[in-house]
Image: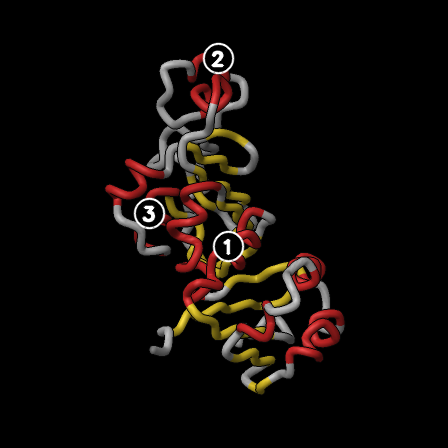
Amino acid sequence: MNKDLKTEIAFEIGTPLMHRFLLLLQHGFMVKCSTGCSVIKFLCEELGLTPEYVSEKIQTVFLDGKPVDDLEGATVKNGSRLSLSSAMPGLVGITLKRGSILASFRQTITYVEEPGTRKEAKGSIYMKLFNLVMKETGSLFLERGICVQSSILLDFIRNQNENFLADCKGIKRNGVQVEAAALESVISSAGDWIYLKVIAGQEED
């Protein structure tokens, strides 16, 4: 269990249910990680994405609210906010895209690295994933484990259909099995944040 949080909730599910949990990732979540490194190093070495995937699929990157063009020159710091997306539609999407020919139109908001910030250390960052990036990489984050706000997880559970929890193969709180009927109470009493893991098992024949 994540030692900084009192409650870990682990769902064991069939693969078809994973797409529902992916929606949590666009609301925002925290990950424990090495910080003080470049965005590209974080994506490839910390998260295990390939340079080819980053280059081809992650077309829009926001770091601390600013669009990033140079993934090598931008540093992920402890407490940073990082958003990842594939290409976004329309003129705004083209303008915000990494290396866009229209990047000059957003010069005043483009991320600029501050000197002396690249000091690697353990920490955490706040992330959001969107569209294709969320669908293709979200399960990696969920199986590894993320920190989510309890209120967001509670709303997510309440918004599912009545069969959702019954379709889960198992639910554990700090390693101990939890009945589906008790889950909302467990989440409500957990504090502001919960460490969440979602593990997709093999479907039975």
Q: Name the residue under label 2.
A: 105
Identify the colour scheme used: secondary structure
Q: Write the residue at 33% across / 37% down.
A: 72
Position in image of residue 130 (x %, y %): 49, 42
Q: In which image quadrant can residue 163 be found?
A: bottom right
> What is the three-letter code of the residue carrying label 3?
Lys
Q: CA–CA distance between discs 2 and 1?
A: 33 Å
Q: Write the residue at 58% across / 73% down.
A: 9
Position in image of residue 14 (x %, y %): 44, 70
Position in image of residue 86 (x %, y %): 41, 36
Q: In which image quadrant can residue 61 be found?
A: top left
**Callout 1: 10 Å neighbours few (<14), some, many (20+)?**
many
> What is the three-letter code of the residue carrying label 2?
Phe
> What is the three-letter code of the residue carrying label 1?
Leu
Residue 143 horizontal side relative to residue 21, left or right: left
Q: Name the residue under label 3.
A: 41
Q: CA–CA distance between discs 3 and 1?
A: 24 Å
In this rendered view, identify the residue nearer to me: 7 or 56: 56
Q: Name the residue under label 1.
A: 22
Contact, mark 3 vs mark 1 (Cβ under 8 Å): no
Q: Which of marks 3 and 2 is nearer the N terminus?
A: 3
Q: Which of marks 3 and 1 is nearer the N terminus?
A: 1
Q: CA–CA distance between discs 3 and 2?
A: 28 Å
**Quadrant where the C terminus lies?**
bottom left
Foreground mark, 3 or 1, reads: 1
**Callout 2: 10 Å neighbours few (<14), some, many (20+)?**
few
Foreground mark, 3 or 2, reads: 2
Q: Write the residue at 45% across / 19% down.
A: 95
In this rendered view, identify the residue nearer to me: 47 or 93: 93
